[in-house]
Amino acid sequence: MSAIFTIGHSNHDAAHFLSLLSTHGINAIADVRSSPYSKYVPQYSKDDLQHMLREAGVGYVFMGREFGARREEEACYVDDRARYDRIAQLPKFRAGLDRILGESQDHRIALMCSEADPLTCHRTILVCREIRRQSPDTRITHILPDASVEPHDDALQRLVALHKLEPELFGDLSSQEGLIEHAQDLQAERIAYTRSMAGP
């Protein structure tokens, strides 16, 4: 069974971030941010991050073109709001899934974005959802800021509770699987990127 981790760099200092990776044996980072730069935590801008990871013996690949949630493709937007279901069908995205699942056979990979809580990030609501659909047996684990972990199934249960969903007698919400799917749809609507309508 292959395994994939996720992590958010948040505002961690470099030493703490590296300790999180070391604690869980991560030897490769797939950066899924749309834009791999940060003016608030510059150590996580692409070049600085890549250098820091290289010094620690951790591989790095930028996969924002495949997995980023802020897309250039016009077809991914409805009323200027990104649609995760449309992003997930892009050829680039599907190719990214194949690559990550293949590389996970040989490396302990963490998908990295910025948010500390996996439920507020597209790495979970978009990317991990599609990983699970394509490869149901892949074990997904979220690394939390205090170095503890949250199994993906536990995160999904937390998401159902977050949206206060309860099972119904009939229909799509009568099963746990249906509740989880609906919770992910609701969260996608909540966190999806909205393009600014402001002109120059």
Image: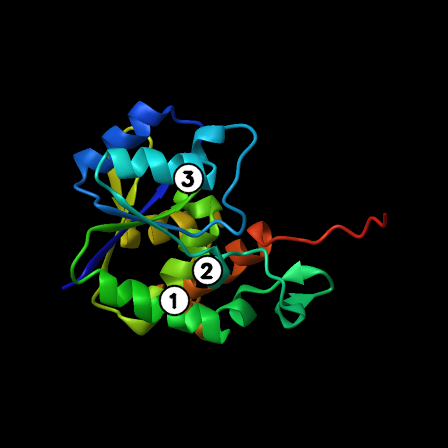
Q: Is residue 24 left or right of residue 144?
A: left
| Residue plotted at (49% across, 50% down) | 163
> What residue did someone put label 1 on?
96
Point out the image quarter for the N terminus.
bottom left
Residue type at mark 2: give it.
Phe
- Check whether the beta carbons of the residues at disc 2 and disc 1 lie within 8 A of each other: yes
User: At which x and y percent is residue 69?
Assistant: 54, 56
> What residue did someone put label 3 on?
117
Q: Earlier in the sequence, mark 2 or mark 3?
A: 2
Q: Residues within 10 Å of mark 2 (few under 14, many from 20)?
A: many
| Residue plotted at (39% across, 37% down) | 49
Which tag is nearer the camera, tag 1 or tag 3? 1
How many numbered callouts? 3
> What residue did someone put label 2 on?
67
Distance, label 1 to label 3, CA atoms, is 23 Å
| Residue plotted at (41% across, 39% down) | 117
| Depicted 156 relative to depicted 133: above or below | above
Q: Is residue 143 visible?
A: yes
